[in-house]
Amino acid sequence: MKHYEMTIQILSPVHIGSGQDIDPLEYVVKDGIFYRLNLPAFLSQMDGSLHAEFNRKVADSNPVVLREFIYRHIDPERYCCFRADAGAFEEKYRQNLKNPNTKLEITLMTRAPGNWQAYIPGSSVKGAVRTAIVSELAKVKKPQNPKPKCFENDVLGCSNPRTDPFRCLKISDALLPQAPTFIDKAEIFKLNKQEGPDPAGIQMFYEQVFSMLDEEMICARGTLDLDDQLPEKRTFDRQENNQISAVSMPLYIDQLAAACKAFYLPKMEAEHNKFYRSNPELETNSQQLLNVKYKDNEFPLRLGRFSHVECTTVDEYRKPQTRQGRDGRPLPWGVTRTLSAGKMPMGWVKVSLNPIP
């Protein structure tokens, strides 16, 4: 087993969703700070008169009245689970706190239960690495079956999950430092113009990790383990009624780094040329990403939501399904980008691996 320290530098804002959306009953924004609230603790410690007032507000069934009550009465420092930089979101929050037609929902980052520390899931890193390696292998092996699972099995030479070579690769969650996030919109950018609001009138805001493009040096830290002995082991396959290799093929660190560079760097450059060159601010931010240098033990990945279809599907076999347009035909894909605060590409990171003796 080979062990590596894994450092993930955040190059552009990253959002990896926890699956939890919260509204202003569960957070407040004050003095530029977003506070995720421990509402049950606040409610359990109210005095009698305040609790009675709260119950009357609940009986009104008016969410705006409850928002205002919480904003006025809660001490966010005392009942805070975690903080984030509110930035430009604070103005939107103040303008719409009393607007019943604006939900002000925020999608949170992945955070550890108990201490609320933000982290990059190891499964996200492993999935991005897997996409790159499968894509590079597919250029050589030319699989014939287009179904996703059969396609991967053909490329990796494994007939069942037990012999999947990625069993050799174990990647831990990578913990982010304290207070690494901010709240802002993720805006859709279309070639030569920016799209208007969502047709349903819904605006979603996201907790995002600060990045190099924000002039912040934010790194998540974890470990990567590569089992170089598992490919040499044998296991009994009941279907074949025979001894077979424990995994279909070995994986190597240099193969992993090379595949990620070969897969992701051309995507970064193609996106720059297609979407950002005509806009000075976007071009400047994108060019900063292109200027990043990678040593032999370093490679780029694109993580989280808004990574876009080109970075989550396999080269030469990319057939994303899109919704139908008004004419009944599938809408084109790859014609929009989602940008943090309307100006920064999302999801780019640099991974560095250093052997642990």
Image (cartoon, rainbow, N blue to C red):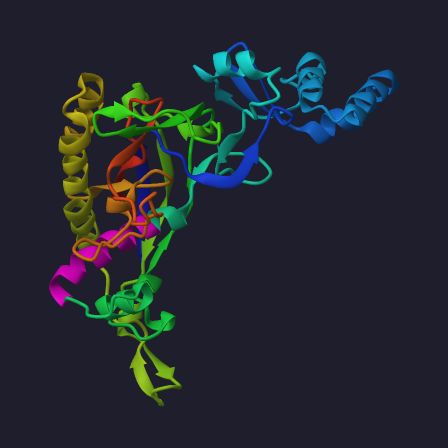
| 111, 22: nearer the viewer | 22
The answer to whether residue 12 is magenta is no
Q: Is residue 294 visible?
A: no
Q: Position of residue 257 (x, y in %)?
A: 20, 48
Q: Quadrant of residue 150?
A: bottom left
Image-based side of 60 in relation to 21, left or right? right
Residue at the far bottom in the pictured view: 241
Q: Residue sitting at 40 percent across and 50 percent down?
A: 123
107 and 303: which one is in front?
A: 107
The residue located at (62%, 15%) in the rendering is: 98
Say above or below: 160 vs 290: below
Q: Main secondary structure of the magenta part?
A: helix
Decide if residue 138 is in sight here.
Answer: yes
Residue 139 on the magenta span: yes
The magenta span reads 127-141
Q: Quadrant of residue 7?
A: top left
Residue at screen point 35% across, 74% down: 160
Using residue 287 as the reference point, say whether residue 73 is left or right of it: right
- In the displayed structure image, the side of residue 99 where residue 258 appears, left or right: left
Please tell me whether residue 43 is drawn above or below residue 270 in the rendered image.
Answer: above
Asked whether 336 or 72 is in front, the reply is 336
Q: Position of residue 350 (x, y in %)?
A: 26, 37
Q: Hey, which residue is sitting farthest top in the picture? A: 31
The N terminus lies in quadrant: bottom left
| Relative image position of residue 156 (x, y in whole percent) | 24, 67
Task: Tell which residue pokes out farthest to the front in this image.
Answer: 327
Q: Position of residue 92 (x, y in %)?
A: 49, 15
Residue that appears at 31% across and 63% down: 148
Q: Nearer the viewer, residue 212 or 23?
A: 23
